[in-house]
Amino acid sequence: MNTPTLALDVGGTKLAAALVDTAGRVLRSTRRRTPAVGVWDEVSAMLRDVRGSAPIRGIGISCVGPIDLMAGTVSPVNITEWMRFPLRDRVAALVGDLPVALANDGVCMALGEQRHGARGGSPYLFGVVVSTGVGGGLVAGGRPVLGRSGNAGHVGHVVVEPGGDPCGCGGRGCLETVTSGPHLVRWARQRGWAGDDAAALATSARAGDAVARRAFRRGGLALGRALASVAAVCDVDLIVLGGGVAEAAELLLDPTREALAEHARLEFLRSARVVPASLGSAGGLVGAAALLDA
Ligand SMILES: [Zn+2]
């Protein structure tokens, strides 16, 4: 029996819905930009469209945090009309008695890579998503670690520069203020680079632009330092790097690996590897579907 799961991936800039089978294959999917208003109307229409009349065994939801698993609510920073929005109940009302599972996007990415990625499936894996922000999620013993409120894995708020730039969370010097796409771009622009976004920054870096190359190197070194701490606390042996900015893989991966090797010195840490994500933008959907078996 391979009845598919309906999967939903809510991001700050894009929405995605799909039918995913139990082998992690995306059978049918749809993707839209996250609208400024009317997000729930868009999400519910996408779920109806992609499901059609197909039988499903339940719904898995990946949502950018913060979330509140006890209440089933979500408060994504980039979706201002969703403050403590009851996403789990709204989705459940669409499907009657079927199971509905919700987790933050970092956990879903990590679980998708652990269950269905091409990179080895270690049961002790940390997934990092570098895009508009920096998120993450932990799988330990083959199971997703959600935390008390559903927010475990928020690696973007590990402090890498005490007294550094202000962060959207209210703190200072968080990893997100160094390595996220908008902050890489801002740092480069302050030093004379003239482009607009992280994709253009990656193009410049590949073309040899010195400021662009330094921006990625600085971001990767900070990421590697944070991941050395994550690996020490969580005892993982595989770290999977995904998200739009991380698709500039070699630019970020090389300095990340360099800093991890420099700081992760204890014997149990030396086998920790950093690899690029293998499921790309489908990782959140595949992981959301896998929540039903977690
Ligand atoms: Zn922060």
Image (tube, helix red, strand yellow):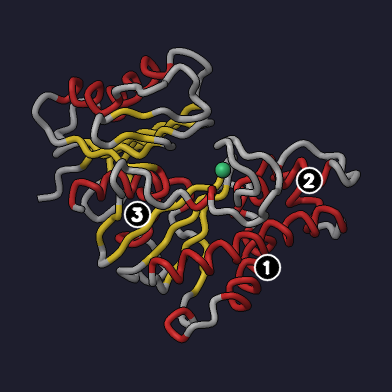
Earlier along the polypeptide chain: callout 3 or callout 1?
Answer: 3
- Which residue: 42% across, 69% down? 119
- Which residue: 42% across, 61% down? 126
Q: Where is residue 90 in the image (x, y as percent from the top left)?
A: 25, 21
Crowd tier of the residue under label 3, counting other residues whose Cα lies within 10 Å: few below 14, some 14–19, many 20 or above:
many
Q: Give ligand 1's quarter of the image.
A: top right
Earlier along the polypeptide chain: callout 1 or callout 2?
Answer: 2
Q: Which mark is residue 255?
A: 1
Q: Is residue 94 toward the left or the right of residue 211 in the image?
A: left
Q: Residue 112 carries which label?
A: 3
Label 3 and label 1: CA atoms lie apart by 25 Å
Q: Which residue lies furthest to the right in this view?
A: 192
Q: What element carries label 2?
A: helix
Mark 2 near ligand 1 (CB under 8 Å)?
no
Mark 1 near ligand 1 (CB under 8 Å)?
no
Mark 3 near ligand 1 (CB under 8 Å)?
no
- Amino acid at pointer 2: Trp
Q: Is mark 3 on a helix, strand or loop?
A: helix
Q: Position of residue 268 (x, y in %)?
A: 42, 82
- Which residue: 36% across, 29% down? 74
Q: Which mark is residue 204?
A: none
Q: Determine which residue is flagged by label 2.
A: 187
Q: Is residue 251 toward the left or the right of residue 191 in the image?
A: left
- Which residue: 60% across, 47% down? 176
Within the image, what quadrant is residue 181 found in? Answer: top right
In this rendering, the answer to whether 57 lies above or below 112 is above
- Amino acid at pointer 1: Pro
Label 3 and label 2: CA atoms lie apart by 32 Å
Q: What element carries label 1?
A: helix
